[in-house]
Amino acid sequence: MSSNRSSFTGKIGFVLAAAGSAVGLGNIWRFPYLAAKYGGGMFLLVYIALSVTFGFALMVAEIAIGRKTGKSAIEAFTALDKRFTFVGVLAAIVPAIILPYYSVIGGWVTKYLVGFVSGDASNMAGDAYFGNYIGSVGEPLLWFALFIGATAVIVLFGVEKGIEKVSKVLMPVLIALTLFIALYTIFSMDGAWDGVRYYLLPDFSNFSLMTVVAAMGQLFYSMSLAMGIMITFGSYMKKDISIEKSAKQIEIFDTGVAFLAGLMIIPAVFAFSGGNEEALGKGPSLMFVTLPKVFEAMPGGTIIGAVFFFMVLLAALTSSISLMETVVSVFMDKFKLGRRTSCLVVLGISVLLGVPSSLGYSAWSDFTILGMQVLDFFDFISNSIMMPVVALITAIFVSFVIKPKAIIDEVELSGKFKWKKLFSVVIRYVAPVCILAILVSSVLDVFGIVKI
Ligand code: TRP
């Protein structure tokens, strides 16, 4: 993003840029493993329900705050009410926590791409491969360093536009490929239909409060909400473009990609391991364990796998670039640092937090925080604590300080606000009450006070 606040050209420009930042590892890697773990169809249902209520209201509010003030998160809150500057600060810290561990996963993706290109594909389909890989010290660190290094170089030299162009062109290819892999698995592998059923048919006995906690965290993460990003995007948006339509388009696009990724991975888990609880509960490793087996079984699978991991890598890079860019611009604005110094500081912080996240699976696997491995801890603290807190205060801020009318007026600058009622009710009552309930229960759960 340039420092002078240029507007997005054209209608589709805004949606594409925002969707480009929204679609990333969150959709392809994180959504499927959460859906597998937290009840399949039940998770999907809760996720969609939250996304048309919470997700919609929060996305509209953030974009409108950004466009109204023409400023990024911290300054936007300051401009509207000085007492709420801290929300912007809190929001700005979130991407700094996400970037390091995001880059560790980005490193895993890079390793898999290189593995497929160098003819190691059948090895990678072995059961123990991934466990052994992340269980080793040096190699994951190397790929992490490469990924975060590449991100830093791109941000430092300001060449992200080029990468973004490439990735926009390739995004439809990634989507088509995901669909193809899903259909291939479903129609050619025994047991896959059980996975389709598990993923599409909600089973109410799978419902738990944890399903809601996980779905809400994922919603924020995947749509880049509650971290100031959409406020910044909104600040670049022209007044005659519909905030409501844009929010809906971003949501549909982002959820669509996540949905397809689930359809690609969950039936395959059933085909290869019968969908037992252990297989479904694998967590962060799910995609890396499952997909190589699918590619192994597929004619031409090595090439398809290589292309697939290449495109996932691009999607991950555009997200990591945008994450780093956000943190760098906060350092530039707040501490009056130059671009290069800010980049180096952010790179330093990322290495500092990323190395333990990577080592958490190998040398430091005995070291846990609140019973979590380091990477899981960073994921938890950002997604399940900080983002809900930011979302909660944003909802309260809109309801009681600037009042929903301020947002509605901004939205109506470009026409009628069709879902106005829904927006008001959600932002005023549903969001504050539900987010608070979820936040409290997830904290109690982690401290072992109640089991949810
Ligand atoms: N939404 C991105 C994804 O799904 C991840 C992400 C979170 C992100 N926060 C962001 C991307 C900020 C860009 C900017 O992978």
Image: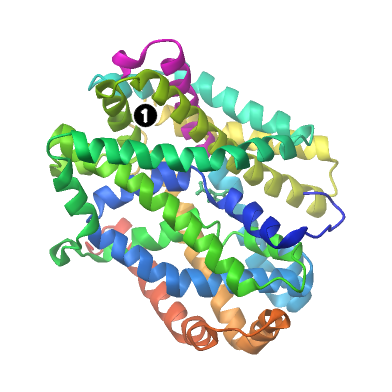
For the residue pair 377 and 200, the one nearer the viewer reads as 200
Q: Residue at x 21, y 43 (%)?
A: 280
Secondary structure of residue under mark 1:
loop
Q: Magenta: predominant secondary structure element?
A: helix
* Quadrant of residue 228 within the rendered picture: bottom right
Q: Is residue 366 above or below residue 280?
A: above
Residue type, mark 1 in image: Tyr
Q: Is residue 371 visible?
A: no
Q: Position of residue 190 (x, y in %)?
A: 12, 35
* Quadrant of residue 270 within the rendered picture: top left
> Pointer 1: what residue?
361
Magenta extent: 101-124
Q: Is residue 315 visible?
A: yes
Q: Position of residue 111 (x, y in %)?
A: 46, 21
Q: Is mark 1 within 8 Å of ligand 1?
A: no
Q: Residue at x 65, y 56 (%)?
A: 92
For the residue pair 166 and 314, the one nearer the viewer reads as 166
Question: 291 left or right of 106?
Answer: left
Q: Is residue 162 above or below residue 68?
A: above
Q: Is residue 418 above or below residue 105?
A: below
Total residue callouts: 1
Q: Residue at x 42, y 82 (%)?
A: 430
Judge the density around disc 1: few (<14), some (14-19), many (≥20) Cα neighbours within 10 Å: many
Q: Is residue 193 above or below residue 443?
A: above
Question: 305 left or right of 203?
Answer: right
